[in-house]
Amino acid sequence: MIWDDVQKNTGTMESQLKKLGASCDWTRFKFTLDPKIIGVVYKTFKKLYDQGLVYRGERIVNYCPRCGTAYSQLEVDYVERDDELYFLDYGTVTIATTRPETIFADVAVAVNPKDKKYKNLVGKTAKIPLINREVPVIADNLVDVSFGTGALKITPAHDPTDFEIGQTHKLPLLKVIDEKGRMTGTPEKYIGMKAEDARVEVVKDLQEAGKIKKIEKIHHLVGTCYRDHGALEPTVSKQWFVNVKPLAEKSLEAIKNGDVKITSKHFEKIAVHWYKNLKDWNISRQIVWGIRIPAFRCEKCLEWTITEGETPSQCSKCNSTSFSQDHDTFDTWFSSGQWPFATLKTNKKGDFEKFYPTSVMETAYDILPFWVIRMIMLGLYETGKVPFKDVLLHGLVRDKEGQKISKSKGNVIDPIEMADRYGADALRMGLVWGALVENDISLSEENINAQRKFSNKIWNAARFVLQFDKEAPKNIGFKVKMTAIIHETSKHLDKYRLNQAAELLYAEFWHWYCDVCIDDAKKGEIGSKELKWGLETFLKLLHPFMPFVTEKIWELTGNKNLLISAEWPKGLPKT
Ligand SMILES: [Zn+2]
Ligand SMILES: [Zn+2]
């Protein structure tokens, strides 16, 4: 079922790209779940595992009880929220928390070693209210002295900072909220309650027991699910992790050496920041749709065997032959992070050797931390080379008021509809127009329509030039100016200033070539041969932006080869 849908949608996407004039080599088309691609992904996973860079660990993960899956650090959407901060009586000390329902999972109370007021408390115990369990008071630098009372309840199974403190002090993990977001392992009355309902109950019980000293309002950041926007539940779970530190270090080096260039200092800084702060990468996802992790667990001794996809024949530890495969699938960025080498290694023979590293990676800037930095890490790891030399990031398409395009705002501009109405060339020019690197793109129907007029202008000018037949003395000024346009355009394109190239060509074709040169030709100052050379040169320069109209006119000029494979114009030789 899903497979059929994907096949159908892949076809739609492919035909949309073709319609918009993407000049890809379609004979090398690859689908993300192509068995050969999966084979490469498995190989990389096994290699990482064999080299100790993949491990199974109990780690705190950002779990969405509604989606039923864990998300990586990158996928957490932090939103500001107003909550209540409860000051609870722990006997020897008062602690502050926004999550009183997790007190049953407390394993310690921590204070900052520099905090003088608690100096004598470290090494003693505190008592969890309602259950009266004693926990040690420990000292750790991660405790923020200015938060609450400066004493923190430590719940390693349900909070990322507490988890770290727990690791340092070798504290046990106690879990009181399960995968479905319900209470477990608590006093009987809360078991099975949803965590948010349990909070209300626990607060009531704490109040009755006289254990709440005060309640304050707090404005803070809460991690939410980027899909359903509900709160995420930090929880401990067994997952597959990649130890990213060695991979991130190599990537940082590649950026420093200039092996890979991000064509904007601003985004280079962002990439560097990510590399320096990446935590181990959780690559397990609890979703059915994806590449299933080739990890097999021995049903007898529970030992894991990692393969390149095939079920192992025998457990190396106990010789058992019964295995069950992990149900989890790979984080999609783990497989798409291998795209540059995976596609080239599974395509035509010699492609990898010929085309890797590729030249430019072009994508929207919002995907930089998800995709681009992972492609660099995995490309370097698997091939020893960066996957691409330049990274060109473009902005997000917004409407003419600069608003995000969304269905609810009713400002969606359907590219296919626009291409049908105004032509793909006009849409392409409309998108490039004003598209500065780092900035979002304001797209409007008026703008696309203006480019349709430009397309008509080219067509009408060409029709005139192709039937024009008049001799004139050599006009060196015309050729000099044309040469300058070629050089200027090439310079912009080499620096990825696509918008400037497009705007230059628009202005020069319209206001110089059409308004001035065609007029001069009519007056006998430019001959038909030169005028035609000028037209063909403009066609070459405009082809990357407007492939359809330029290719059609090129055909009418009597050229036998396709314009797309014509040589880039040079102009007059430099003197
Ligand atoms: Zn969710
Ligand atoms: Zn075994």
Image (tube, rainbow, N blue to C red):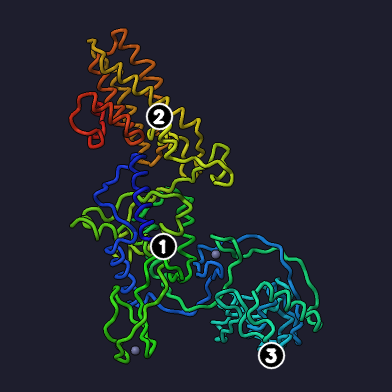
Asked whether the residues under the numbered discs 1 and 3 touch, taking CB atoms below 8 Å apart as contact, a structural biologist would say no
Q: Which residue is mark 2?
A: 504
Q: Which residue is found at the position 40% from the left and 29% from the top?
A: 504
Locate residue 508, reporting x and y percent.
Answer: 38, 24
Amino acid type, mark 2: Leu
The residue positioned 45% from the left and 63% from the top of the image is 275
Q: Amino acid at mark 1?
A: Trp
Name the residue located 42 percent from the left edge and 25 percent from the top edge.
Answer: 453
Q: Amino acid at mark 3?
A: Arg
Position of residue 192 relative to residue 335, above or below, is below
Spot occupied by residue 469 in the image (x, y as percentages of width and height): 23, 12
Q: Classify the position of the C terminus by image quarter.
A: top left
Q: Which residue is mark 1?
A: 333
Image-quadrant location for residue 525: top left
| CA distance separating discs 1 and 3 | 43 Å
Q: Which mark is residue 167?
A: none
Front-lying residue, 213 or 456: 456
Whole-number angstrom distance, CA of label 2 to CA of label 1: 38 Å
How far from the left and from the top, in percent, is residue 150? 71, 76
